[in-house]
């Protein structure tokens, strides 16, 4: 018997502030529509705030990039 399909969205950004500001409401909306939502970004208070506000799983991975 096949396992049921599991819908998962993984968002990756270099800084948690991007998820905090640009993805406001979108993450929780997708979770409410049956998706498992995971945000991967540089660890910090912004990423923690995303997890708390949107009620989604976050994974902190140290990363950085130059401003372009």
Image: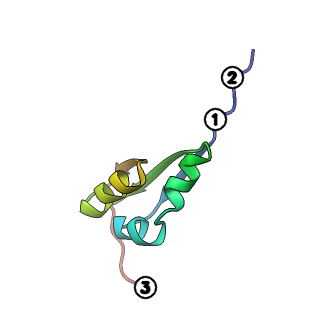
Q: Nearer the viewer, residue 10 or 62?
A: 10
Name the quarter where the C terminus is drawn.
bottom left
How far apart are labels 2 and 3 at the CA level? 43 Å
- Which one is in front in this view, the residue at disc 3 or the one at disc 1? 1
- Classify 67 as above or below 54: below
Give me the C-alpha separation between circle 3 and circle 1. Answer: 36 Å
Name of the residue lying farthest toward the bottom: 68
Q: Residues within 10 Å of mark 1 (few under 14, many from 20)?
A: few
Q: Is residue 63 left or right of residue 24?
A: left
Q: Sequence-wise, which precedes: disc 2 or disc 3?
A: 2
Q: Earlier in the sequence, mark 3 or mark 1?
A: 1
| Residue picked out by circle 3 | 68
The percent position of residue 57, horizontal first and vertical second, equals 41, 45
In contact (CB < 8 Å): disc 2 and disc 1 = yes
Q: Is residue 62 visible?
A: no
Q: Which residue is mark 2?
A: 3
Disc 2 vs disc 3: which is toward the camera?
A: 2
Between 4 and 59, the one lying in front of the other is: 4
Q: Secondary structure at mark 3?
A: loop
Residue pointed to by mark 1: 6
Q: In the image, what residue occupies the spot 35% across and 64% down?
A: 16
Q: Are marks 3 and 1 in contact (CB under 8 Å)?
A: no
Q: Position of residue 31 (x, y in %)?
A: 54, 47
Dot 2 crowding, Cα within 10 Å, few <14, some 14–19, many 20+? few
Looking at the rendered structure, the secondary structure element under dot 2 is loop
Element type where label 1 sits in the image: loop
Task: Name the residue at 37% across, 82% down.
Answer: 67
């Amino acid at each position: 018997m096949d396992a049921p399909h599991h819908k998962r969205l993984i968002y990756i950004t270099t800084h948690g502030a991007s998820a905090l500001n640009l993805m406001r409401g979108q993450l929780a909306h997708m979770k409410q529509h049956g998706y498992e939502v995971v945000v991967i970004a540089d660890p910090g208070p912004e990423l923690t705030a995303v997890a708390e506000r949107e009620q989604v799983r976050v994974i902190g991975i140290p990363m950085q990039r130059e401003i372009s």
